[in-house]
Amino acid sequence: MFPTMLYAQCAQGGESAQGGGLLGFLPIIIMFVILYFLLIRPQQKRQKEVEKMREELRKNDKVITSGGILGTIYSIKGETIVLKVNDDIKIEVKKSAIAGKQNN
């Protein structure tokens, strides 16, 4: 009689566990959707804007590097940019080091 009761309890609990299993993942799925729309998607959008800005760089654009160096683009050679920092000083930086354009 004892094994029969155990079998009956397992069968009854098994049915509710299957339905509850999908509902158990629902909060995790909702959290992932919220994180996607609040964090991941805006970051991807900003990354695309930065890449577009770097592709549109032209000679004589005033830029700032990620290290804080202000300069004017003297020339562009593939993925390398030569910045004119002063009348006598020119430095070579990677295109990925350009953080943005200056408004002035």
Image (cartoon, rainbow, N blue to C red):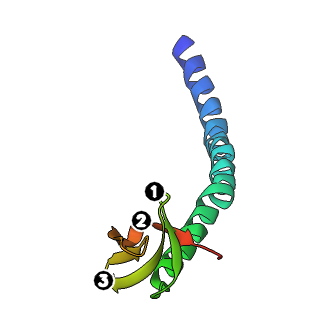
Disc 3 target residue: 78
**Quadrant of image for the C terminus:** bottom right
* Labelled disc at residue 67: 1
Q: Position of residue 72 (x, y in %)?
A: 47, 77
> Observer-nearest residue: 27 or 72?
72
Q: Which quadrant would residue 39 be assigned to in this image?
A: bottom right
* Label 1 or label 2, whichever comes before in sequence order: 1
Horizontal arrangement in the rendering, residue 3 relative to residue 85 (left or right) = right
Tell me how far mark 1 sits from mark 2, CA to CA: 8 Å
* Label 3 or label 1, whichever comes before in sequence order: 1
* Labelled disc at residue 97: 2
> Observer-nearest residue: 52 or 25?
52
Tell me how far mark 3 sits from mark 1, CA to CA: 20 Å
Horizontal arrangement in the rendering, residue 73 relative to residue 46 (left or right) = left
Q: Position of residue 102 (x, y in %)?
A: 60, 73
Q: Position of residue 80 (x, y in %)?
A: 32, 76
